[in-house]
Image: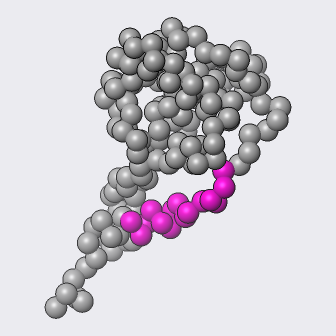
């Protein structure tokens, strides 16, 4: 009898994800008017930032990765589009729909060991968009001195070699 079968593990994981991470607001928060603005980006700095990103990472929903983006810096038209996208992310100037698309992540649930009979547990992992992660790394590099001055050692790992991939515990 199908009714007596336990739930499929993926159904349990999906339920757990919904409990741990309920759907957020449909509207993204507005960027403050006092946020720093970027007039332009240096293509060599952006290329170096992309090159220093971790190799072989799982992509976000669009599928963009370091390995896909790096060769595009050799084509002027492609390089210009990459810089345009990153500048728009940094300055919050893209359309709301484009910003919303860049805010999505692929979320996977890694199961945790639990005691027999305990409710299932998991650790959600979100893979965000490479453009957003790259823009965040550029902003951290640009504002490094201010961040260190304001937060001291508390934010050290955000400026660590692995950049925004490093987690503060």
Instruction: Answer with the quarter of the image where residue 4 lies.
Output: bottom left
Q: Which residues are magenta?
A: 14-28
The extreme left residue here reads: 1
Q: Position of residue 46 (x, y in %)?
A: 52, 16
Extreme residue toward the right, this view = 34
Furthest toward the top, the residue is 44
Horizontal side of residue 105 vs 35, given as left or right:
left
Residue 108 drawn above or below residue 60? below
> Is 125 located above or below residue 142 in the figure?
below
Q: Specify whether residue 5 is in view.
A: yes
- Toward the viewer: 55 or 46? 46
The one of 46 and 81 positioned closer to us in this rendering: 81
Tell whether position 15 is magenta: yes
Q: Residue at x 63, y 37 (%)?
A: 94
Residue 106, horizontal then vertical, whole percent? 41, 49
Q: Position of residue 161 (x, y in %)?
A: 49, 18
Q: Quadrant of residue 22?
A: bottom right
Quadrant into which the C terminus falls = top right
Specify whether 8 is left or right of 36: left
Residue 109 lies, with reference to residue 119, above or below; the image says: above
Q: What residue is shown at x 51% (from left), y 62% (from top)? A: 20
Q: Residue at x 43, y 66 (%)?
A: 16
> Looking at the image, what colour scheme do you see?
one colour
Question: Vertically, is 107 above or below 76?
Answer: below
Which percent across, then down, holds residue 113?
33, 58
The count of marks equals 0
Q: Say whether residue 99 is left or right of residue 48.
A: right
């Amino acid at each position: 009898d199908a009714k007596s079968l336990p739930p499929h593990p993926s159904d349990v994981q999906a339920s757990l994800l919904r409990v741990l991470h309920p759907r957020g607001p449909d509207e993204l928060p507005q960027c403050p008017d006092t946020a720093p603005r970027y007039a332009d980006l240096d293509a060599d700095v952006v290329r170096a930032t992309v090159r220093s990103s971790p190799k072989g990472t799982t992509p976000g929903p669009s599928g963009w990765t370091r390995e896909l983006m790096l060769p595009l810096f050799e084509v002027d038209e492609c390089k210009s589009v990459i810089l345009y996208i990153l500048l728009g992310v940094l300055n919050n100037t893209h359309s709301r729909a484009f910003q919303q698309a860049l805010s999505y992540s692929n979320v996977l649930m890694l199961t945790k060991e639990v005691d027999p009979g305990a409710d299932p547990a998991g650790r959600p992992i979100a893979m965000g968009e490479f453009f957003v992660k790259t823009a965040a790394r550029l902003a951290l590099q640009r504002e490094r001195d201010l961040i260190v001055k304001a937060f001291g050692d508390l934010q050290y790992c955000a400026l660590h070699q692995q950049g925004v991939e490093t987690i503060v515990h």
